[in-house]
Structures are given as C-alpha cells and as structure tokens.
Image (cartoon, rainbow, N blue to C red):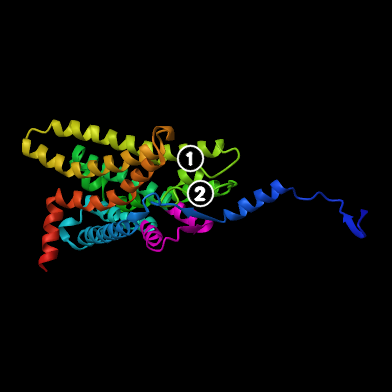
Amino acid sequence: MRYTKVKGETHVNLPFPQMSHQEKLQEENLTQLMEFVLLGFDEIPHLQWFLFGLFLVIYIIILMSNGIIFLITKMDPDLQSPMYFFLANFSFLEICYVSVTLPRMLVNLGTQRRRISLVACATQMSLVLILGSTECLLLTVMAYDRYVAICNPLHYPLVMNHRVCIQLVTGSCIPGLPIQIGLTYQIFSLPFCGSNQINHFFCDFPPVFKLACGDTFMNEMLLYIVVVFFGMIPFLLILGSYIKIIVTILKLPSAITRAKAFSTCSSHLMVVLLFFGTAIITYIIPKSSHSERTDKVLSLFYTILIPMFNPMIYSLRNKDVKMALQKLLCK
C-alpha cells in the first residue's frame, strides 16, 4: 500500500485493480437488461387504439369459437370418435396458445407500458415454444388418425381405441416440456448487452436471440436442431401421410365416397399448410431474405389469425360439427 500526498491531502493507492470506465458501462448495460421493451407496433403509433380494439375482438372470437368446439365435442354423443377427441384437445390447445401472447399485447397497446421483466419474458418464451411444439405434434397425430381411418378402415376401431388416443395426446405434450425449457434456459444464459428493445409483440426467440452478444454459434445450432425436430420432421410425416391418403382415395370406386373422404381431410390439411407454412418461413428460412416487419406479420398469422380461423375451417366444412352446433343453439 502506498500513500500519495497532493495539496495537503493524503490519498491511498490500493493494491487491487480499479474498474475501468468501459467495464462500468458494460456492467450498467447488463444491469439494464434485467428487463426488456417489447416494441410491438410502435412504428404506427396513430393506430394503437384501433389495434387494441381489433385484437380484443379477435381474442374474444378465439375464446368463444374454440370454446364452443371443445364443448360440443365433449357433450354431443355423435362427436365421440377419435377425430373429434383430437379436435377438442386441439381447440383447448389453441386457447392456451393465444392466451400466452394476446393478453400481454393488449395490455401493452392499452397502457403503452411495453416493459417486460427478464423472468416474465423467459416464461412467455418457454410457454410459446412448449405449446407450439405440442401443436406441431398434435397436428401430426391428427394426420395419423386420418391415415388409419382411410387407409386401414377395418382396423380403425382397434388401432385408435380410447387408450391409444389418450397416449397419443399425452405423447404430443411431453417431449416439448424438457426440450423447450432447456432451450429457453440456454438463450437466457447468454450475456445480453447493448439495446434491450425487442422488435416484436411477444418474447419470441429470434428477436431475443439478436440481443445476445458473444459467441452464439452452438446456441444457433441447438435452435435449428429443435426447429427441425418439432417443425420439419412432423411436417414431412404429415405430408407422407397425406400422400398415402390421396393415393388410397383415388383408388375408391365411388365418386361420392371419394368426395366424403376428401372432405374429412381437407380441413385438417388446410390448417397444417397455414400453420407450418408461416412457421417454417419465420424460423427456418434465412433472415436475410425477409425483414423484421415480415417476421411480425408472419407471427401474427400463426399465433393469432390461424387460431381464429381454425374453428371456422373445421365447423364450416364439417357436417357433423354443424349439426352439433345447430342442436346446441336450439336447446
């Protein structure tokens, strides 16, 4: 320890190194990132209240329409087949999926307080990933159900019994839990520096990942592996199932039978193409080919608009569902 005297004052030179100005700034930046700012739709400030009203109406429609589908598939005795059992679980999943993102977005639009804590952001991301991966697997299970019903109709009651249906739904939920929680932990274990602004309306992993600094190569590889496992592989399995289904339908002798078989599959196939199409563009196609604004629009499709359209697609194109709705309304 050394003493230095300057203008009559004694100063102590401590033996340990002092923090530099740059290190202090870095520490302050990392401290600021205990919370994020969801920019949402800040580029159109004059439309904030219009968007609030629009998304509030959409949220109510999603809750009511999916809730009605879930209710009639549980109550109507004519809708107790495996196909409607999976549809009921799918509708319930859509309600949960939308409720993770839309209420927070409505609060941000209504109050203009866009801040979200790091813990809340990580929780929202993990729930979106878990429910999203469950939806991918459940859509695959629904395709398998249609495959067995059309390609092996004689074995359908035996293969798709109630116990197997419960196992398939459970199997759709379980794989995403540890993998997506682990993925979220990996992302939020990265150091965040610089800006704390997320150019999105919820904590999705691509915009959050952009705020990380340091070497993120291994984390990027892990992200792509998870996306391929829960996105591309289920999508390819669904396409393979529908190729076999279409080949089988085309071999049917009666035009009426062919039309009926196509009608039972067309609704599900439409939902698959809408959901997987927008998700694959968002997460797999290189970001250089589309802007952040495009990412937000695509995210609106698979997180909000598609859950709103799904009940309409299933009810308007399904005679059994329409009959069950009429009986419910007539009571």
Badge 1 marks a residue whose secondary structure is helix
User: Would you say residue 319 sits in the magenta stretch?
Assistant: no
Asked if residue 252 lies left or right of residue 270, the reply is left
Of helix, strand and loop, which mostly describes the magenta segment? helix
Asked if residue 40 lies left or right of residue 301, the reply is right
In terms of depth relative to the viewer, which is nearer, 283 or 211?
Answer: 211
**Position of residue 217 measured from the top left corner of the image (x, y, whole percent):** 55, 35
**Position of residue 42 measured from the top left corner of the image (x, y, whole percent):** 40, 52
User: Would you say residue 111 sits in the magenta stretch?
Assistant: yes
**Residue matched to label 1:** 223
**Residue matched to label 2:** 184
- Tell me if residue 260 can be seen: yes
Q: Amino acid at mark 1?
A: Leu
Residue at the image position 38 percent from the left and 55 percent from the top: 101
Badge 2 marks a residue whose secondary structure is helix
In terms of depth relative to the viewer, which is nearer, 14 or 273?
Answer: 14
Quadrant occupied by the C terminus: bottom left
Q: Amino acid at mark 2?
A: Thr
> Which portion, as a residue range, is magenta?
102-127
In terms of depth relative to the viewer, which is nearer, 313 or 205?
Answer: 205
